[in-house]
Amino acid sequence: MSDYTPLSELGEFGLIKRLNEKIELSQPSTIKGIGDDAAVIEPGEKQIVITSDMLLEGVHFDLTFCPLKHLGYKAVAVNVSDIAAMFAKPTQITVNIALGAKYTVEAVEELYEGMRLACENYNVDLVGGDTTSSRTGLIISITAIGEVAKGEAVLRSGAKENDLICVTGDLGAAYLGLQILEREKQAFMADPEMQPQLENKQYIVGRQLRPEARMDVIHDMKERDIKPTSMIDISDGLASELFHICAQSGVGATIYKDNLPVDEQTLEAAMEFNLDPITCILNGGEDYELLFTVPIADYDKVKNHPDISIIGKITDKSEGINLANKHGQSFPLQAQGWQHF
């Protein structure tokens, strides 16, 4: 007999009851979570920020190499990243999933365990959602809710000329991690006996499979009294996100090639695949780092921050959006990041 439980044995309400047994609520603003027709939240005098993200099997993830627990964690993290990009604090999420017949109760529990770990890490309450059947694989849709003091939300539209352009962490790692995983998948399909060649690749593979939202930097910036003028999370690639900020702020920008932060594993993997690391940094996507601008008066506050790199400056709109090298030459930047359609 199989040790796994078919979903049909529990049914929708039995599954929800079983999953809900491990959900603990911690946010003061959560009045009522799972179990009623709707969740009830009471944020008080703050403003609410809401974001939603959908992940589809075969489009956004491949279960050949993506563990369900990692997928659950990532599904929460990418939504928390959007809340972070608003300079807000995430408080609640709702989770909608559509499942194919191949999924067992234990598989769904593994997915939710990843979500639970992410909720615990980011101090977020899972307060509701929906489950249904799917004929096209696993679909995950998460809505994240956050709160921010009135007037404190950071939009994409606030960048001003001479502001510093900054990014958190390093870039290009998630894209190269995906190239590694895709290569190993092809090798496995050709020879199921082979062992994946992931030596010295754990960091970049982890950046693809289980990214982290940079709430740590948001908390740190608030403690240091750093208030960005504009901000966006890097999901579709640095260049694409910079274009969004410049378009909505009505400005131009220059970023400096030598200032772009990159990890050694990313550089080594780019050489292995004969890829230009700068192209991977600019257009790779899925890093979920933060791209933001700060007034030049805040230079001393950010210059020595271990997780922040100053990569350029905001210019007048007439100057366009450019990439400059160490010789002072500038070239128009191209945004070639993730295309959804």
Image (cartoon, helix red, strand yellow):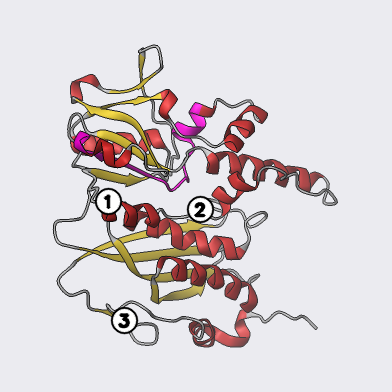
How crowded pointer 1 is (Cα within 10 Å; few <14, some 14-19, many 20+) is rated as few
Residue 161 at x, y = what percent?
18, 30
| Magenta region, residue range | 278-297
Residue 281 magenta-drawn?
yes
Q: Residue at x 31, y 80 (%)?
A: 39
Residue under pointer 1: 224
How crowded pointer 2 is (Cα within 10 Å; few <14, some 14-19, many 20+) is rated as many
SS label for mark 1: loop
- Using the image as rendered, state which of residue 322 and residue 87 is in the foreground: 87
- Using the image as rendered, state which of residue 156 and residue 329 is in the foreground: 329
Residue 124 at x, y = what percent?
39, 70
Q: Residue at x 77, y 48 (%)?
A: 188
N-term-proximal mark, 1 vs 2: 2
Residue 211, which numbered label? 2
- Using the image as rendered, state which of residue 99 and residue 215 is in the foreground: 215
For the residues labelled 3 and 2, the Cα–Cα distance comes to 30 Å
Q: Is residue 255 above or below residue 339?
A: above
For the residues labelled 1 and 3, the Cα–Cα distance comes to 38 Å
Q: What amino acid is found at the position of numbered circle 2 in the picture?
A: Pro
Give the foreground label among 1 and 3.
1
- Using the image as rendered, state which of residue 225 and residue 295 is in the foreground: 225
- Marks 1/3 in contact by CB < 8 Å: the verdict is no
Taking 19 as reference, is 272 left or right? right
N-term-proximal mark, 3 vs 2: 3
Give the foreground label among 3 and 2.
2
Q: What amino acid is found at the position of numbered circle 3 in the picture?
A: Ala
Q: Tell me where residue 40 sits by quadrant.
A: bottom left
Residue under pointer 3: 38
Looking at the rendered image, the quarter that the C terminus falls into is top left
